[in-house]
Amino acid sequence: QKEVEQDPGPLSVPEGAIVSLNCTYSNSAFQYFMWYRQYSRKGPELLMYTYSSGNKEDGRFTAQVDKSSKYISLFIRDSQPSDSATYLCAMTVYNFNKFYFGSGTKLNVKP
Amino acid sequence: DVKVTQSSRYLVKRTGEKVFLECVQDMDHENMFWYRQDPGLGLRLIYFSYDVKMKEKGDIPEGYSVSREKKERFSLILESASTNQTSMYLCASRRGQGSYEQYFGPGTRLTVT
């Protein structure tokens, strides 16, 4: 079983839709959770970072962590064509020595 | 702005060749990483380096070696390239231990024929 599972998509939505991206994980020691966005032919860039359980909001983006279910989500409100990218979740334990990445979900927002 | 650059965007090599992938960061970061990215498998860690001349194996080090002679430069070496090493290779750096953010380069698409 992979440490981190993520639906690869692709996910296609109309502009303005609310998007929900999710990852599940198996290691209960994970405490730090990140979402990276990767545009085509580019490297990933950090989008959101959350520690432990709870929600974190940044503009149109909300990251949610449910440690009891080992489930994390990224919500995108009022999605834009510029949000079209692959979104990767990542997580690590307290010492940040090693990061575990999901395989990425490809999102396409249609104008 | 942190910048991580990789020597080539696209590379085509023959089976058995020795291949060098170079990565340079300009922010005096202590830690550097090499990943490969394959469809359905995500990012898998090949090697990482905490400091100059220090390296540790990641999840898939077989067939690879690394070199970090200077703080800003981290090289990935494929000793004898094979077709199953055809992949996207991503280099990343981070400030140091305890820092959660990694900064990635644009990647090198390597094809081994």
Image (spheres, helix red, strand yellow):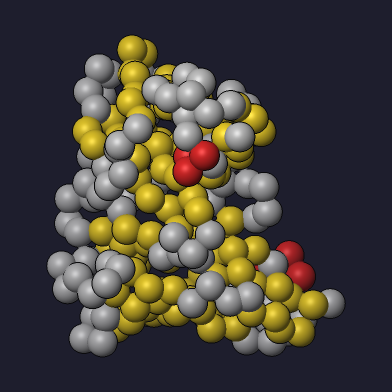
Residue B102 position, x and y percent, is 41, 45
Q: Residue at x 71, y 73 (%)?
A: A108
Q: Residue at x 61, y 34 (%)?
A: B113
B100 left or right, relative to A39: left
Closest to the observer, A98 or B71? A98
Q: Inspect this view and state whether residue B86 appears.
A: yes
Name the image quarter holding the N terminus of chain A: bottom left
Q: Is residue A4 above or below residue B59?
A: below
Residue B59 position, x and y percent, is 27, 47
Q: Is residue A5 above or below residue A47?
A: below
The quarter holding residue A106 reads: bottom right
Closest to the observer, A3 or B87? B87
The quarter holding residue B48 reads: top left
Q: Residue at x 50, y 54 (%)?
A: B38
Q: Is residue B14 above or below residue B37?
A: above
Residue B57 position, x and y percent, is 24, 36
Closest to the observer, A45 or A101? A101
Name the image quarter holding the C terminus of chain A: bottom right
Residue A16 position, x and y percent, is 73, 84
